[in-house]
Amino acid sequence: MKKIRAIGFILLVVGVVLHLFVENDSIDFVTGLFMGAGFALLILGQLKRNL
């Protein structure tokens, strides 16, 4: 597994765990960021830009 995909997986897991165990409205924004970034890194971690 590539390093960037591993980071994405960790962000996704942290976002899900925070969403399940923390009951606070301000945490919902942070968990959304973590899950969105983790999902994006899992999907797009393999792609490289050629400029």
Image (cartoon, rainbow, N blue to C red):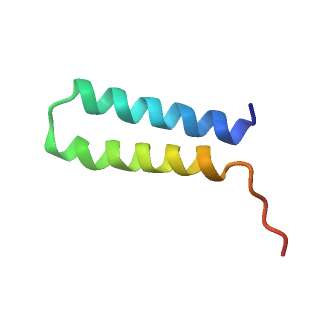
The correct choice, above or below, for 44 with respect to 22 in the image is below
Find residue 13 and report its image quarter: top left
Q: Is residue 44 left or right of residue 48?
A: left
* Quadrant of the drawing holding the C terminus: bottom right
Residue 6 in the figure: left or right of residue 1: left
Give the residue drawn at x 42%, y 30%.
Answer: 14
In the rendered structure, the answer to whether residue 23 lies left or right of residue 50 reads: left
Instruction: Tell me which residue sits at (19%, 46%) in the image.
Output: 26
Residue situated furthest right in the rendering = 50
Q: Is residue 27 above or below residue 47?
A: above
Residue depicted at x 38% and y 36%:
15
Q: How many marks?
A: 0
Residue 19 relative to residue 45: left or right? left
Across and down, in percent, residue 36 comes to 44, 50
Quarter of the image for the N terminus: give it. Answer: top right
Q: Residue furthest front?
A: 43
Image coords of residue 47 (percent x, y) = 74, 56
Q: Residue at x 24, y 23 (%)?
A: 21
Residue situated furthest bottom in the rendering: 51
Measuring from the top left, give residue 18's x and y in whole percent. 31, 30
The correct choice, above or below, for 12 with respect to 40 in the image is above
